[in-house]
Image (spheres, rainbow, N blue to C red):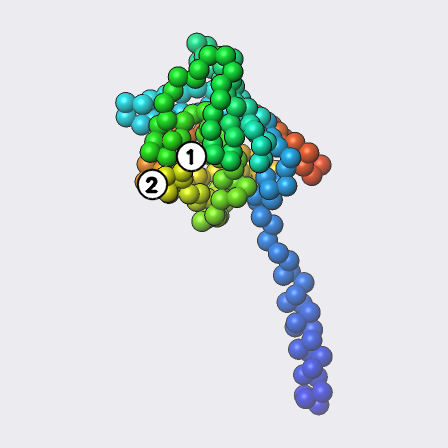
Amino acid sequence: MRKGLCVPMMALVLLLAGCGAGEKEDPRAAYQEMAGCTMEATVRCDQEGLDWEGTLRCDYVPGGQSTVEVVAPELLAGVKAIISDRDWSLSYEGETLNIAPLSEEELSPAVCLPRLMDALRSGWLLEENRETWNGEACIRLLVDQSGASGGKVVSAFWLREEDAVPLHAELAVGEETVFTVEFTEFDFDDTIEGMEAAASER
């Protein structure tokens, strides 16, 4: 009699084991599917002798040309740069954003936001865990993306857990953090309904 019950019981165990075995959703999926995004953020460089802080607005277009506009400081407000993500080349409208690259990987403030979005879309995921940022539940991602000079470029992101909107990011070359970014506005373009959101102003 025990032998007769064995097969149904095994089948029940397998059935129950499969019920919760769905694939884990990739928090980067919204970025990989989006037609683009618009964001505004405070970008800061703390490298010794190269201290810089400004507010930048970016219209990011995957695989195309993105536009970055300076909102602050006032002296540079309105200056725009066009960034191609094929070679990360820059062209400027009007006055030149006279800020030299701040690392051996030619990472300038103008390319910081597009590079971060590109890393989210196609970088190699190193770590994923849950943390809080300014009291909000977040998914923290650590993403590796090779630099133009072959050096290691690693980006860390704190994405709000409820909608994957970025709140904070850090971009490092080698062991040194080059930029820290505080997002104040963010909107997805043409993604799944309900994904569009604005990050709380800091």
Mark 1 residue crowding within 10 angstroms, few (<14) / some (14–19) / many (20+): many
Mark 2 residue crowding within 10 angstroms, few (<14) / some (14–19) / many (20+): some
Residue at 28 percent of width and 22 percent of height = 49
Q: Is residue 37 left or right of residue 95?
A: right
Q: Nearer the viewer, mark 1 or mark 2?
A: 2
Mark 1: which secondary structure? strand
Q: Position of residue 160 (x, y in %)?
A: 55, 37
Q: Report the Cα–Cα distance between label 1 and label 2.
A: 13 Å
Q: Position of residue 5 (x, y in %)?
A: 70, 84
The quadrant of the image that shows the N terminus is bottom right
Dot label at residue 170: 1
The residue to which callout 2 is attached is 174
Q: Are marks 1 and 2 in contact (CB under 8 Å)?
A: no
Residue in the foreground of this view, choosing between 101 and 17: 101
Residue in the foreground of this view, choosing between 116 and 168: 116
Residue at 47 percent of width and 48 percent of height = 124
Residue in the foreground of this view, choosing between 39 and 165: 39
Q: Is residue 134 visible?
A: no
Mark 2: which secondary structure? loop
Residue at 36 percent of width and 42 percent of height = 151
Q: Which residue, as the protein is rendered here, is positioned at the far left?
A: 49
Q: Position of residue 164 (x, y in %)?
A: 58, 38
Q: Amino acid at mark 1?
A: Glu
Q: Is residue 69 visible?
A: yes
Q: Which residue, as the protein is rendered here, is positioned at the far top?
A: 75
Residue at 44 percent of width and 39 percent of height = 156
Which image quarter: residue 31?
Answer: top right
Dot label at residue 15: none
Q: Position of residue 93 (x, y in %)?
A: 51, 16
Q: Amino acid at mark 2?
A: Gly
